[in-house]
């Protein structure tokens, strides 16, 4: 998982966009029109029907934070380069992860090179997504990081 969340009126929202000095909460539920949402096309030209938004000023958002996962594999922490689509909780019987690795030798030494993918090669660094590793062989580290509500500010 690598998601960002807002807390507005003691409710947590993960479907939103930054809009100038505000956020727009998003929903596909037309019932949200009763909750002060408007067709999203009224905020952004050219948007298709079926999406609704509610403008929320930074000042009305009490928290903003991200939740992200990392993997502990053989006593080293890695960024997740990929996992089974739709399996953010890693509970499916065939759950797996791929590691973001800069060291090709690590892939070879740990038998992870067979279905590894070259992701990027620039600035003198080469990035790989390792072969698939069953979740049973790693430890998932889920973390939360507080972020400034006002996206213009830095922490």
Image (cartoon, rainbow, N blue to C red):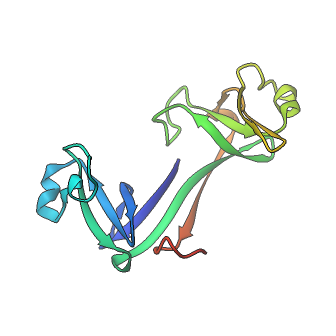
The extreme bottom residue here reads: 59
Q: Residue at x 50, y 42 (%)?
A: 89
Residue positioned most to the front: 45
Left or right: 21 in relation to 79:
left
- In the rendered picture of this protein, how many numbered marks are placed on residues? 0
- Residue 43 picture location, percent across and down: 26, 59
Residue 104 lies, in percent from the top left, at 84, 31
Residue drawn where x is 39% and y is 56% of the image: 14
Between 153 and 138, the one lying in front of the other is 153
Q: Residue furthest top?
A: 114
Image quadrant occupied by the C terminus: bottom right
Compared across the picture, whether 101 is left or right of 82 comes to: right
Q: Residue at x 23, y 43 (%)?
A: 48
Residue 81 point in image, percent of width and height: 64, 38
The location of residue 80, given as percent across then percent down, is 64, 42
> Hey, which quadrant is residue 18 in on the image?
bottom left
The answer to which of 148 and 69 lies nearer the viewer is: 148
Q: Is residue 103 left or right of residue 59?
A: right
Quarter location, residue 39: bottom left
Please, is residue 76 above or below residue 7 in the view?
above
- Residue 5, relative to residue 153: is it above or below? above
Residue occupying image coordinates x 54% and y 69%: 146
């Amino acid at each position: 998982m690598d998601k960002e969340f807002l807390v507005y009126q003691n409710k947590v929202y993960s479907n939103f966009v930054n809009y100038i000095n505000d956020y727009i909460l998003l929903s596909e539920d037309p019932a949200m029109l009763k909750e002060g949402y408007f067709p999203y096309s009224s905020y952004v030209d050219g948007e298709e029907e079926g999406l609704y938004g509610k403008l929320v000023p930074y000042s009305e958002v009490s928290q903003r934070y991200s939740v992200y996962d990392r993997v502990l594999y053989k006593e080293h922490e890695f960024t997740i380069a990929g996992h089974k689509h739709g399996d953010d909780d890693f509970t499916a019987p065939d759950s797996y992860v791929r590691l973001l690795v800069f060291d090709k030798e690590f892939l070879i030494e740990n038998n992870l090179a067979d279905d590894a993918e070259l992701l990027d090669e620039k600035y003198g660094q080469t990035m790989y997504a390792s072969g698939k590793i069953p979740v049973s062989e790693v430890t998932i580290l889920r973390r939360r990081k507080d972020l400034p509500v006002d996206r213009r500010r830095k922490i």
